[in-house]
Amino acid sequence: MSRVSTYLNFMGNTEEAFTFYASVFGTEFSVPIMRNGDMPAPPGAPELPEHERSLVMHVELPILDGHVLMGTDMLESMGHTLRIGNNTTLNLEPDTRDEAERLFAALSEGGSDTVGLDPMPWGSLWGVTLDRFGVRWMCNVSLEAD
């Protein structure tokens, strides 16, 4: 079933922020917190410094009426910097690969900072783009989707 969620980026304090949000909304994380050290480094990528391995790669928190906040820590070692424009992303999870490709292509048209749809170790086709209006969109669809 498709869904839309809000993805938030932080510089090292995602877990603190999401613990706070859980207390505000009275909810619990829907999946265990995934840490950067839990995933293998992509081929050719440098190994992460020890202090970044324990940072949050992914967390999910349901808030109101089925809406989910997701979050991650950006990594200084990868050249990430937090600024208005990359701190919030709308995350699209369509039901099919065709729909993911259609949405991603349309949102990327005239945009910038695009990382194309590629297979990821968590079993999804994933990409992100900043559309021509300055809104960040992430697309995530299961590799098993038709």
Image (cartoon, rainbow, N blue to C red):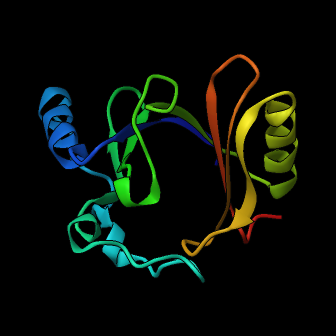
Q: Residue at x 51, y 36 (%)?
A: 5
| Up-down relation of residue 80 to residue 40 (above or below) | above
Q: Residue at x 64, y 35 (%)?
A: 137
Percent of width and height locating residue 121: 57, 75
Q: Residue at x 53, y 33 (%)?
A: 89
Quadrant of the image for the C terminus?
A: bottom right
Percent of width and height locating residue 41: 48, 79
Determine whether, in the image, residue 84 is placed left or right of residue 133. left
Numbered-mark total: 0
The quarter of the picture where residue 136 lies is top right
Of 22 and 14, nearer the camera is 14
Q: Residue at x 26, y 50 (%)?
A: 29
Percent of width and height locating residue 24: 15, 27
Determine whether, in the image, residue 96 is placed left or right of residue 66. right
**Outermost residue to the top:** 133
Determine whether, in the image, residue 42 is placed left or right of residue 146. left
| Up-down relation of residue 47 to residue 98 (above or below) | below
Percent of width and height locating residue 37: 32, 75
The quarter of the picture where residue 84 lies is top left
Determine whether, in the image, residue 2 is placed left or right of residue 14. right
